[in-house]
Amino acid sequence: MTAPSTLSPAVNRTTRAMAAGRDAGWLLLGNAVGAATQWAVIVMLARLGGPEIVGRYAIGLAVSAPLILLTGLALRTVQVTDQTSRYEFGDYLRLRLAGAAAALCGIAAVAMAFDAGAAAVVVLVGAARALDAVGDIFCGLFQRHRRMREIAVSMAVNGVATLVAMAALLYLTGSVVWAVLGSVAASALATLGYCVPASRILRAREARPADRRPATRLSTMVGLAGVALPLGLAGTVTSVAANLPRYVVEDQLGITALGIFAALGYVALGANLFAGAASQAILPRLTRMFADGQIERLRVVSNRLVLSCVLLAVLAVPGTALLGRPLLDLLYGAPYAEHVGILVILVPAVALASATYFLDAALSATRSFGNQLAAALTVTAAALAAVFLIPAYGLAGAAWSVALPAIVQCGLKAALLRRVLRRHASWRSRGAA
């Protein structure tokens, strides 16, 4: 009787690389459909409604995003990197549900500052994002168990249903309020109609026996919130920094100018699409590298990913200058194509900002959540440039208000990651000695 053969380290590495590539492929597909449909929503709003309608929708996104992130506490990242299963799925879900409810209350309070039509759009966009936030926890469960196909299907269902519902309702009613109500229905379909039933077996697998559950749910939620708070605050501050130019554009230049600026920004979504999908797919792998003490390998992989984004940012400048005007005219029409110079600034800025997805993934793998909060606070200082640049230079100033924080954030998080990895390498070398 022969002993079973064992796979060589090289074969194991190849197998893991193929699995990571397959995971990234599913996430890329889901993100591609999601991003394409988001972009198509903006194109549809621009064609059927014009810049003012786009602006109303954009302000709804800008108001809701920071509050959803603040109360969401980046729980999916904490969930995926929880290698010891300190918390079960129900803990994450209960905290996310409480956060989504709190976010909706905050969004409704902020909406009171707008006129009735804009307020309705803000609240409905917030409701859709809150449902998406709940679905995100189910996607975290799928990701923990390497079920990337389910994540891709969820994103595709949400994106396609959102586009179809919004386009049909806007065409039939001419009202952006009714159109955004269609977005709420689509988010409910993806979360309640797909994620909940698709996760039934995985939820049962992660549930703890009754004798191992904590005495009180509240103490568990408070403990989990304490772990996730630094990362959640970091995401919130970064979101505020990213949306600050939109707030100032709406205040200084008007809702129509915001519609043009938002539409231009969506053209640059491709870089974030790839980076977001790839960073989520590689996060479990980076977490295992760190847990196994492969600090140098983690550093090399992270550097390669970041450098690819920097190269993309450099190549984006001549590419956008050459193709930007005909692309804008094709997608949105002549009023948008006149602002191609803004796009030349935005596209490389967003490409560079996509590097932070990989830096965040590497920092999250080391569970250095407090370091990310410090970086986000510094980025906010750079984003305050919007207050001065937009009144002076209009939409060009808004574009530079996006570019400057991207440069600061990328450089700062790269320095933070280098310091964290160096410190952990030093600790491990002393432990080995």
Image: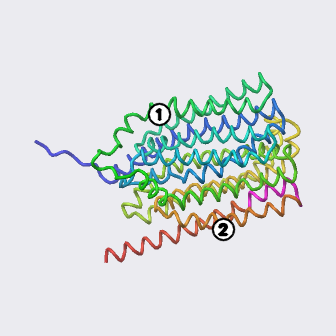
Residue identifier under label 2:
378
Q: Is mark 2 on a helix, strand or loop?
A: helix
Residue 320 on image: x %, y %: 77, 48
Q: Which residue has dot 1 on it?
A: 196
Q: Picture quarter containing residue 373?
A: bottom right
Q: Quadrant of residue 33?
A: top right
Nearer the observer: mark 1 or 2; the answer is 1
Residue 2 coordinates in the image, percent (x, y):
13, 43
Is 402 one of the magenta-colored residues?
Answer: yes
Label whose residue precedes the other's in the sequence (1 or 2): 1
Q: Is mark 1 on a helix, strand or loop?
A: helix
- Number of on-image labels: 2
Residue type of the residue flagged with mark 1: Val
3D distance between C-alphas at marks 1 and 2? 38 Å
Left or right of residue 57: residue 207: left
Please tell me which residue is depicted at 68% across the width and 31% down the height of the picture: 181
Residue 222 locus on image (x, y percent): 46, 57
Residue depicted at 72% across the width and 65% down the height: 382
Look at the picture and state if 116 lies above or below 408. above
What stretch of residues is rendered in magenta? Answer: 392-403
The disc label shown at residue 411, or none: none
Name the quadrant of the N terminus: top left
Q: In the drawing, does residue 404 fall left or right of residue 206?
A: right
Image quadrant where one finds the C terminus: bottom left
Q: Is residue 214 magenta?
A: no
